[in-house]
Image (spheres, rainbow, N blue to C red):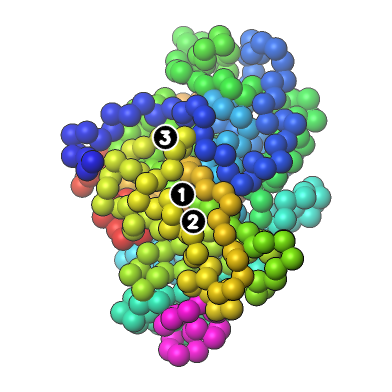
Amino acid sequence: MTMSPNDLFNTPRQPVKNATVPFWHRDIHELHDHRTTEELPESSDVVIIGAGYAGVSTAYHLVKGEASDKEVSITILEARGACSGATGRNGGHLRPDMYTPMTRLIDRAGVERALEVTEFEIANVHAIKSLVEKEKIDCDFTLTRSIDVWSNEETARKAKEMYDKLASHDLEYMKDVFFMLGKDAEGVSGVKGAKACASFTAATLWPYKLILHLTASILETGRVNLQTHTPVESVSRQSTGSFVVTTPRGTTVARKVIYANNAYISGLLPQYREAIVPCKGLCTHISVPEGTRAPLLNNSYIVREEDNVASYLIPRADGSIVVGGANLRYHSVLSSWYDNVDDSCLIEQVKDHYHGYMQRHFNGWEGSGAHVDKVWTGIMGYSWDSQPHVGAVPGEGGQYVLAGFNGHGMPQVFLSALGVAKMVQNGIEFEDAGVPRLFQTTKDRLEKAKNGPLGGDILGIKR
Ligand SMILES: Cc1cc2nc3c(=O)[nH]c(=O)nc-3n(C[C@H](O)[C@H](O)[C@H](O)COP(=O)(O)OP(=O)(O)OC[C@H]3O[C@@H](n4cnc5c(N)ncnc54)[C@H](O)[C@@H]3O)c2cc1C
């Protein structure tokens, strides 16, 4: 069934029960369903809504990181289990986008602001590497190169034009980008029929393990109270300036509230209804039969097939593959993905897309026996203008947001969380928080999303 604009924005924006189970939840952590105390604490300095990458990273910076304070008390309220949202069900691809959105951002906002975004994403990769080393986190973190592949003649040529345009700006980071157009693209990438490819530094990891390790580490400080299976229903300001946070299990009071509930933010802050829309995606795990050796993949990928259907893909050290995306396959059927919070079922149009995927697209995998052994869905917070919303909620003192990370939060969230932690703890302004200016949540951005074309970048741009 195709939706009309009038049908949109009517779904309740709360996580559903019985979500599909992602490969990453194979080994459920002992803190997955944790409640630090039987009852909600009466009050705390900060309530964080959402225990995904954004919520847990912010708490980490507040109690252990650069913006830490020995006195602060934090309550994290999570609707489902810890890391059960997009972070626990993503592709594990920590890949700064070196150029695809850059040309658009340069046209919209100028080189300086666009460059802030790319440099920030690169800095996030290095920040996570340092974090994993410092905290000794067992999360399969691997620093690698990511290869973007175009199998369509025309888009390959356009990608080359994009590369030339960026190279003409003499951007320092472009020294890490290698581009190849023509017949050798297939040999370099290993992807059948590749017409062009580009590579640059990126990383892969097991996101759930990263977040659950950080969760354990912040709980050890004794200053964080985690309450899973506790959906926030509303937040209201008291005359004292504090906030009453209401859940089905009772209320708790906070001096400050941080909304780290990504796709679901407008369920609590309706002014984000058009600016951040829940959009559903699908991901799979592919393994090869025991005793079989498929060709080693040293790189992570974005593969655009001949018809421009794109997938993200990471190889794992055990020889298995995590791959997902293919949203062009269902893009026209809005009801299957747009304004959709239902990650309890698959996406009909694409649920079988990855059967035989490695054999179809990667040289040497034909006789590998590679097969899909897990398929799941997850809900992303797509933002109207493709940039996340970070900072103080416009016109609402004491409330902060970091949400709307699209399908691309891995290289954006950690240092955005540091920025928010600094704003909350040290009272600094957004401008001094080290977060790209284009990420700042502003009244203007919310208004544009409300009054501009339906869906903005989400519906207007080929993904
Ligand atoms: C299938 C899929 C593949 C992806 N692949 C990649 C990838 O490879 N690379 C990449 O960079 N990005 C990828 N992403 C996007 C990435 O996962 C997100 O951008 C990122 O994880 C966002 O983190 P978050 O903490 O903001 O959101 P989430 O991880 O979604 O956390 C939000 C949390 O808030 C909770 N919550 C919501 N409402 C409430 C409420 N009212 N009360 C209490 N709790 C609430 C949710 O249950 C959830 O746990 C993918 C996403 C999906 C779905």
Disc 1 within 8 angstroms of ligand 1 (CB): yes
Where's residue 438, x and y in %? 42, 52
Instruction: Give the amino acid at mark 3.
Output: Asp
Instruction: Give the amino acid at mark 1.
Output: Leu
For label 2, the residue is 324
Disc 2 within 8 angstroms of ligand 1 (CB): yes
Give the magenta-colored segment's residue range: 181-195
Instruction: Give the amino acid at mark 2.
Output: Gly
In the image: residue 394, left or right of residue 206: left
Reply above or below: 373 against 220.
below
Counting the numbered discs, the total is 3
Residue drawn 81% across the image and 50% down it: 136
SS state under label 2 = strand
Residue drawn 77% across the image and 49% down it: 137
Q: Is residue 77 magenta?
A: no
SS state under label 1 = strand
For label 1, the residue is 282
For the N terminus, give its image quadrant: top left
- Mark earlier in primary sequence (2, 3): 2
In the image: residue 207, left or right of residue 238: right
SS state under label 3 = loop
For label 3, the residue is 342
Q: Distance between the residues labelled 2 and 3?
A: 17 Å
Where's residue 307, x and y in %? 33, 70
Where's residue 198, x and y in %? 50, 77
Query: Disc number at residue 322?
Result: none
Q: Does the magenta stretch include residue 192?
A: yes
Q: Mark 3: few, some, or many residues within 10 Å (few <14, many ≥20)?
A: many
Res 304 quadrant in image: bottom left
